[in-house]
Image (cartoon, helix red, strand yellow):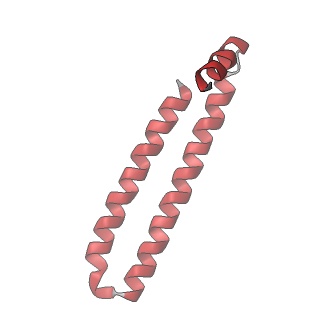
């Protein structure tokens, strides 16, 4: 079903507009996700300062994974 919708959108010539909307949604989602990661990490460090290095390491890894998925989503949306 999604394939048929995508083919109809390409035939109608609106794939660029839909791709831009998809890319924008991917970026907004990544921004929200990274904001949540950062906020929860700061909260965790405030509660347990002795675990700051472990929390920071995990936060950086999670943020990098979110960025990777967002980049992939933007590329797929613009194709």
Horizontal side of residue 55 vs 39, given as left or right? left
Q: Compared with residue 39, is residue 9 higher up or lower down, i.e. above or below?
A: above
Task: Name the residue furthest top.
Answer: 11
**Left or right: 48, with 24 as reference point:** left
Q: Residue at x 73, y 14 (%)?
A: 12
Q: Position of residue 75 (x, y in %)?
A: 48, 31
Position of 38 compared to 7: left or right?
left
Depth order, front residue of 45/3: 3
Find residue 7 and report its horizontal and vertical position in percent.
63, 16
* Residue drawn at 40 percent across, 57 percent down: 63
Quarter containing the N terminus: top right
Going 68% across and 11% down the picture, which residue do you hit? 11
Q: From this view, report whether residue 27 is shown above or below residue 3.
A: below
Of residues 72 and 2, the one drawn nearer to the viewer in this rendering: 2
Residue at image position (55%, 46%) is 27
Horizontal and vertical percent position of residue 72? 44, 37
Say above or below: 43 vs 14: below
Seen in the image, is 2 located left or right of residue 60? right
Residue 53 in the image, given as x and y percentages of width and height:
26, 75
Residue 61 falls in image quadrant: bottom left
């Amino acid at each position: 079903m999604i394939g048929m919708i995508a083919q109809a959108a390409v035939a109608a010539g609106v794939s660029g507009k839909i791709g831009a909307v998809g890319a924008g949604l991917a970026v907004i989602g990544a921004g929200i996700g990274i904001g949540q990661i950062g906020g929860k990490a700061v909260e965790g460090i405030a509660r347990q300062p002795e675990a700051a290095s472990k929390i920071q390491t995990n936060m950086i890894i999670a943020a990098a994974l979110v960025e990777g998925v967002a980049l992939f989503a933007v590329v797929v949306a613009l194709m």
